[in-house]
Image: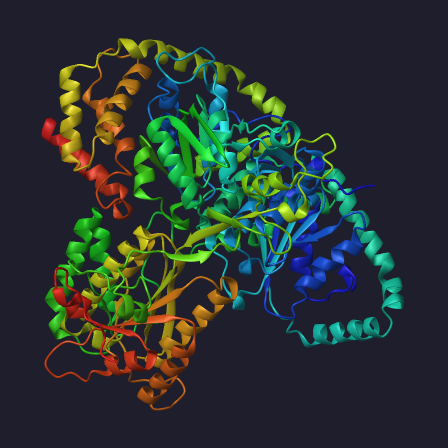
Amino acid sequence: MEYRAEQNRTGQDREQNGFLYPFTALVGQERLRTALLLNLVNPSLGGVLIRGERGTGKSTSVRSLAQVAPSEPATGGPAPSGLRVVELPVSATEDRVVGGMDLEKALQAGERQFQPGILAQAHGQILYVDEINLLDDQLVDILLDVSAMGVNYVEREGVSHSHPSRFILVGTMNPEEGELRPQLSDRFALAVEVKGEHERENRIEILKRRLAFEENPEAFCRHYQSEEANLTARIQKARDFLPRVKNNGTFLEMAAELSIHMKSDGHRADIALVKTGLALAALDSRPEPGIDHLARAAEMVFPHRLTGSPFTEVSRLAGALRQWLDKKA
Amino acid sequence: MFPFSAVVGQEKAQKALCLNLISPGIGGALLMGSKGTAKSTLVRSLARLLPEARIFNVPVGITEDHLLGGLDWHAAIKTGRTVFSPGLLAEAHGHILYLDEVNLLDERLVHAVLDAAECGEVRFERDGLSLGYPCFFSLVASMNPEEGDLSPHLLDRFGLCVDMGAVEDPAQRTEILRRRLPFEKDPMLFLQEWRKKENSLAIRIRESQARMSQVRFPAELLGVAVGLSSAKGCAGHRGEIALCRAAKALAAWYGRSGVTERHIREIAAFALDHRASDLPKDAPPEAPAVSKSDSDPGSEGLKGAKRSRADATDPLERDVAAASKQDSVVSSRTPGEEIQFGISEGYSAPETANSPFDREKSGAKSGRRHRTRSVLGRGRASGHRRPVGKPRSISWDATLKQALPRQAGRRKGNLCVSIRCEDIRENRRKGKTGRILLFLVDASGSMGAHRRMAAAKGCILAALKDAYLRRDRVALMVFRRRETRLLLPLAKSPDLAERLLREIPTGGETPLALGIGNALDFCRKIKARESATPIHVLLFSDGRANVSTTGRNPIEETLDICKTAAKENLSFTVVDTETGFVRLEMALKIADHLKASYRRLEDLRENNTNSRIIPPK
C-alpha cells in the first residue's frame, strides 16, 4: 500500500478537488476587490499590483477572480471571451515565457518552428505573477517590454517570431521580501496595499469560511453560486454601461490637476486615473463621473507612484489627497 | 535506525511530526534546535515508523532542475519526443519531504517547496515544457538557529514550529543514555524490544488519519483561535488557520470527533509562537528594548521622544517634531544618556559598488551590480559551452548546429537529425546578484555630540536608497554599551530599514571590538550559505573604543579584530564620524587595519567634490 495523503488535502490553496474559493466569499479587503473588478469592467485598464504582508489571501483573491468574469466579449478590450488566469511561476525559464524552438518538430521533421510560451497563452487573459518581486531580472525586463508594446518579439534559438500579447497583469508581492523595480511597478495601473484583518469578527468569519470550504468545497461553492452570478451580472452591466459614461472636459481637467498636485511623474498616472474613474462610475451606473470617483481612483493609482516611491507611506497619500479635496471643496 | 518512540525529552517535536503526518495540510513542521537535539534522528526514524512513507531529503546544494524536474534530454535525442523527467518534488508526492538545514538552502528553492506544499500542485514552465503535476506531501524541516536565521516570511509559511531545547532534566539525561547504549550495542535487539510500541504508534497515526474527515470544528471556538493569534500579534491569517487545522488533527489523535478548547490551547504555541511579533498590533514598530530598566537615566528621554511621535499622526510631521525636540536638548546631554536622533537630509551614499582597491585601479563608477556565474542556472544566456558532467540547461540551437555537419554515417532512425551526447551544448549564463551591505553603526554616547548621529543616519539613509535601487540586500547592526544588536537581518525592504533607523537610540560606551566581532560572525554565517555573494561592511564610528567585554585594552583589542577581519573575504568602508578641531583620528587607524576605504562623514555631503577622496594608504 502506498502512503497517500489524498483524504487530507486540506492544504490546497489553489483548488479543492477542482473547486476554487468563490470570489464573493472573500471577507474584507474592499479596495483589493474593487481594483480587481475594475479590471474586469475595463480589461484594458492596466492591471493591479497587490502589496501586502504575509498570509492575507492575496493569491486566493486573484485565483478566484476569473470565476466572476463575464463570458461575453468586452467592447474594445483585449478579452475575446471569458477570462482565464494564466500563471507565470517564479521558477519559469525564459524559453517558456517568451516561447522558443519546438524541439520535437526540429528532431522529428527537421523544421524550425516556434513553440508559443506563456506570453502567447496570456494574450487576452489575466497574467498572474505570484511573488513578482522574486522574478529574475531578465524575466522582468521581458515583461516590461511586452506589456509596453503589446507584442512579443522572439529572436532566440534560431527562431524569429512575433505575436500580439496583451494581458491584464496582476502581480502580488510581500514588500518585506524586497521591492519591485520602479519601472515595473509603474506598469501597473493600480496598486493596493493589503493588510490582515484586525477586526475580531472579520477574522473569525475568514476562519469560518476557510474551514467550511476545506470541509466541503462543493457545498461551499454551491452556497455562493447565486452571489457569484449576481456579481458577474453586475460586471457585465458595468461593461455595457462604460461607453455611456461621459468623459467630459471638467473630469479630465480635474484628473490632470490631481496628478500635478500629487507630483507624480509621467502621464501613465493621469491615464490610469481617468480610466479608473470612468470604470468606477460605470460600476455605480453613473453617467457623469464625479470627484468622489476620482478620489477613490487616486487611492489605487498613486500608492506606487509617488516620488521616492519605496519610501512613501500610505498615510502620506491619504493626507495629500485630503488636502486636494479640501481645496476643491 | 533509532526508533521514533524511544527518543526521550522531545515530546513536543514528536507530537508536531505526528500531527503533520495525520494532516499534512497543516503546512509542515519545522524543528529548531542546536546540534545534537535529535532533530534528524527523529525525522529519519519516521521512515521506520511508517514503512509505506518514504522520506525525500532535499540536499543543501540542490539545483532547480533537480528539485522541480526538467526535460529528459536522453529521451529527446533518442526518440525525438520531449518528455518530462520528474524532480524531487514530483517524487515526494504522497510521501515525506525533508528540508534539513532549511536556513542554509537557497531561498528561492525553499519558496518553491513551500508553494508546492501549500497548493498541492506544481506549475512547471521550464525547458520548453508546460505542465502541472500533483505534489502533496508531509513537509518536515529542521534548522540550527546558530548557523543563521530563516527569514520571517519563510518562517511564517511553516504550519507548526517547535523549538527543541537540549534535555536538561538529569533523570531524562540518564534515560537517554540508558536507551542509547543498548541500541549501539545491539541495534536489532533494541528495535525488537521497541517494535510493539512503534507498531501501536503507527496504528494510532493511521487511525487518526482516517478519522480526520469526521472531525468537526465547532464555530463557537473560532473566536478562541483568533483571540490567541491576535494576542501574540501574528501578522496575516496563517497563524489561526494553521492553529485550527492542527487542533483538528489533535482531536483526531485523541480519538475525538470534535475539537475542544483544550485541544486549541494545547497546540497554540506550536502554530503561533514562530509567527508572533513582539509588537502590539496597529502600533508603529517601537524602538527595540535597549534600555533594560526604567531606572535607566536615559529612558525618560526615549519615552518622551516616543510619545511625541505617537501624538503626531502624519509620519513626516512626526519626524520633524522628534528632530526638533532633540535639537533643542542635544547640548545638555551627558554621556550616559540615551536619545534618538532624527535623520539629516542631504547626504550622498558612500561609494560601495566595488571594493575600494578596484576603484583605485580602474576608477570604476558605482552602480554596477556584481556579475557572478549563476549557481542555479538562472540569468541571461550568454553563449554556450560543452557541458562538464550532466548538462544543466541545454542550448538546442547550438546543439543542432554541432550535430548537423556530422550527420553523414549516423543512423537517424525515424528522426531527421541524429544527436549524440558529444553534440550537446549548454547555455552559459551570467546572473546578476546583488550584494549584501551590512551597516555597522556605533550608537555610543560619543556619537551624540554635535549631531553626529543625525548626520550618520542621513548618510545611511542615502546608502539605503542607493542599495534599494541596485537590489542589494541590507542588514543593520548597532553596537553600544557592551552589546550588539542586529536590528535588521538581511532584507531588501528599505522601508523597514528606514523605520528602524529612525529609532536607533544613542548613549553609553563604545564596544567597538565586540561590534566588529559580531559583524564578522554574521558575515561568516551568510558566507556559509551563499559563498558567491559579495559582502560589504560599512562601519559608522568615530573609532573611540572605550570598553571591552574581555577585559583587554579596548583599542588594542579593536585593532586586533580588525586585522582578523581584513583576512576574510569581505570589503569594508569606514565612515569617520569624528568632527571638531581636536581629532584623535582613531577611525583612520581602524580603516588602515581593516584595509578599508575611508570616508569622513562631513565629506559625504551632497555636491561636495571631496566626496570621492581615495583613502590614504
Give the position of the C terminus of chain A as an image quadrant. top left
Residue B103 found in image quarter:
bottom right
Residue B339 found in image quarter:
bottom left
Question: Residue B132: percent from the left, percent from the top?
Answer: 61, 33
Asked whether residue B406 appears in the rendered view, the answer is yes
Between B24 and B107, the one nearer to me in the picture:
B107
B396 horizontally vs A26: left or right: right
Q: Is residue B221 above or below residue A152?
A: below
Between B207 and B440, the one nearer to me in the picture:
B440
Q: Is residue B212 above or below residue B575?
A: above
Between A101 and B194, the one nearer to me in the picture:
A101
Count of marks placed on residues? 0
B577 horizontally vs B405: left or right: left
B282 horizontally vs B63: left or right: left
Model colouring? rainbow
Asked whether residue B257 appears in the rendered view, the answer is no
Residue depicted at 63% across the width and 57% down the height: B59
Residue depicted at 21% across the width and 47% down the height: B313
- Residue at the limit of the structure toward the front, as seen here: B408
Between B607 and B555, the one nearer to me in the picture:
B607
Question: Residue B345: percent from the left, percent from the top?
Answer: 16, 58
Give the position of the N terminus of chain A as an image quadrant. top right
Question: Residue B563: percent from the left, percent from the top?
Answer: 38, 83
Residue depicted at 67% across the width and 36% down the height: B83
Q: Is residue B346 above or below residue A196?
A: below
Q: Is residue B233 above or below residue A184?
A: below
Residue depicted at 22% across the width and 66% down the height: B456
Question: Residue A238: percent from the left, percent from the top?
Answer: 35, 13
